[in-house]
């Protein structure tokens, strides 16, 4: 294997941009091509992906360190006025870089270059002055910049595909969290109380970006959370949702807002779907009128109650059953049955994003037991996940394309490693922009050395759990 540390940062950037080189021979052959090497070394900031990434990070740094941001997202007018060891700016950087260790260990690492001993109690006092919406606002700014400036935004027939899905988070038990997010008692002798929160996100499934994410009371319905995502979406978006979102009032709202959708429906609850399932047709155009309950929902929201012209599509699955999809893409020439079936399968990344957030980012392994701490942790992890996805895909796209041309199988980045390694970029951002190009080149280089093979058509049986999951023990983090 090559001694990659001996290679200069500029040459590492060249290799990262050009492709993955594991052997010394490959690296020497590449570096021997003087024309390519001189081009990359002399034009580092002109390479589109690296220039974009630098501007992307510069925007984040400017927004964090702007005094107006501090004034807008502090809980009181006197908060963050004095010069403290952990002021507003440092607090944002620290929370973005929080890992799996205990808060005290993370604080010790954060202040390792200073002769300062900072306690977790002092951190709790400082975070109580911070509005959790600051991370949501920063996420909106970064996403807006990405969609305006990025050159490789993936779409489907001109649509931005948005997967909307919900899940639950198990939170540590405290009276404040039980009151704010809801709880239930387990079916055991002791009747242990478990605190749960309902989460939902509108997720760009092709570009793997969480456009909007919400955490609410456990009793909040997924339909209500879906409705709260709609102001963040535009007319060029196509929403893909599962059975929980098949409601007339929601479809009527989407039609009124000129948004397209593909939703799976329950055949036993929709008479049109039940009749269609009993037939042999692959697709059918229908007119759906609101029920009495749907009429009331529409009137409450001032939504049109006219019948909707929609399209049913049959999707055979491996078990021999058929799934039924309903959509307002009624033109079968522009969107054939086969493409609609493939379209619904593209929803899967939103499910994978929850897996990444829960298992890799440890979304349930919180750094506090107050409602404010929960909101801060949720919003900051969503922001960091987006930073990781945008930077990793932008920086490694051409390198991965080069690798896939040379290999039998298709490869992709390791998203777990991408998320973890984003911390080094956040740390460099805090120190300054002088060495940021070298840092992001090192980031891209390491990701290209840790690619994972794409394994399509994998299926894992779903196991129903009847017992509560074990709690996360905040006190015993290493």
Image (cartoon, rainbow, N blue to C red):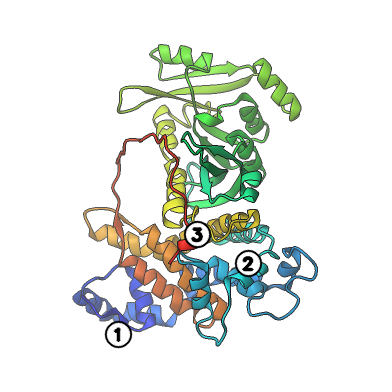
Q: Position of residue 360 (x, y in %)?
A: 42, 56
Q: Is residue 250 above or below residue 280?
A: below
Residue annotated with mark 2: 124
Count of labels in the image = 3
- Tell me which numbered mark, 2 or 1, is placed earlier along the sequence: 1
* Numbered badge on residue 86: none
Residue annotated with mark 1: 6
Query: In this rendering, does residue 24 appear at all?
Result: yes
Q: Residue at x 67, y 44 (%)?
A: 231
Quadrant where the image shows the C terminus: bottom left
Q: Position of residue 309 (x, y in %)?
A: 59, 21
Q: Position of residue 21 (x, y in %)?
A: 26, 70
Q: Position of residue 195 (x, y in %)?
A: 56, 44
Residue annotated with mark 3: 474
Q: Is residue 296 above or below residue 200?
A: above
Q: Nearer the viewer, residue 92 or 279?
A: 92
Q: Residue at x 50, y 62 (%)?
A: 475
Estimate how packed mark 3 is, as few (under 14), some (14 to 19) or many (20 or more) residues with alpha carbons within 10 Å: some
How far apart are labels 3 and 2 at the CA level? 14 Å
How far apart are labels 3 and 1 at the CA level? 41 Å
Determine whether label 3 and label 2 are within 8 Å by CB: no
């Amino acid at each position: 294997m090559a001694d990659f540390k001996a290679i200069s940062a500029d040459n590492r950037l060249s290799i990262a941009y050009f492709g993955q080189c594991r052997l010394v021979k490959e690296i020497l052959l590449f570096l021997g091509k003087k024309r390519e090497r001189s081009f990359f070394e002399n034009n580092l900031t002109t390479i589109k992906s690296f220039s974009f990434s630098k501007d992307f990070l510069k925007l984040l740094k400017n927004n964090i360190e702007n005094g107006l941001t501090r004034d807008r997202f502090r809980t009181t007018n006197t908060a963050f006025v004095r010069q403290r060891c952990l002021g507003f700016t440092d607090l944002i950087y620290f929370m973005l870089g929080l890992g799996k260790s205990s808060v005290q260990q993370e604080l010790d690492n954060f202040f390792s270059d200073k002769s300062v001993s900072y306690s977790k109690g002092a951190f709790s006092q400082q975070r109580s002055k911070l509005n959790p919406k600051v991370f949501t606002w920063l996420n909106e700014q970064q996403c807006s910049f990405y969609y305006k400036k990025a050159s490789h935004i993936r779409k489907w027939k001109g649509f931005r595909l948005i997967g909307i899905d919900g899940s639950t988070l198990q939170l540590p038990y405290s009276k404040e969290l039980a009151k704010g997010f809801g709880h239930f008692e387990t079916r055991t002798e002791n009747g242990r109380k478990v605190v749960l929160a309902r989460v939902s996100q509108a997720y760009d499934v092709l570009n793997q970006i969480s456009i909007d994410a919400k955490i609410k009371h456990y009793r909040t319905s997924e339909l209500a959370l879906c409705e709260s995502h709609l102001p963040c979406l535009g007319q060029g978006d196509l929403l893909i949702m599962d059975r929980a979102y098949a409601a007339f009032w929601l479809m009527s709202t989407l039609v009124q807002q000129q948004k397209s959708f593909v939703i799976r429906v329950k055949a036993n609850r929709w008479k049109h779907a039940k009749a269609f399932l009993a037939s042999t047709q692959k697709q059918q155009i229908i007119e759906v009128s609101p029920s009495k309950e749907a009429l009331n929902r529409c009137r409450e929201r001032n939504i049109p109650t006219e019948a909707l012209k929609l399209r049913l599509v049959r999707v055979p699955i491996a078990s021999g059953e058929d799934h039924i999809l309903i959509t307002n893409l009624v033109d079968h020439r522009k969107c054939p049955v086969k493409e609609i079936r493939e379209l619904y399968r593209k929803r899967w990344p939103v499910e994978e994003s929850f897996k990444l957030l829960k298992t890799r980012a440890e979304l349930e392994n919180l750094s506090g037991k107050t409602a404010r701490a929960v909101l801060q942790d949720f919003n900051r992890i969503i922001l960091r996940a987006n930073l990781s996805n945008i930077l990793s895909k932008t920086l490694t796209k051409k390198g991965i394309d080069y690798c896939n041309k040379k290999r039998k199988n298709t490869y992709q980045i390791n998203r777990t490693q991408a998320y973890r390694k984003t911390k080094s970029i956040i740390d460099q951002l805090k120190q300054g922009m002088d060495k940021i190009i070298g840092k992001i080149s090192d980031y891209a280089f390491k990701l290209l050395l840790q690619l994972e093979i794409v394994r399509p058509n994998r299926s894992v049986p779903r196991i129903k759990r009847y017992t509560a999951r074990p709690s996360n023990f905040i006190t015993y983090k290493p």
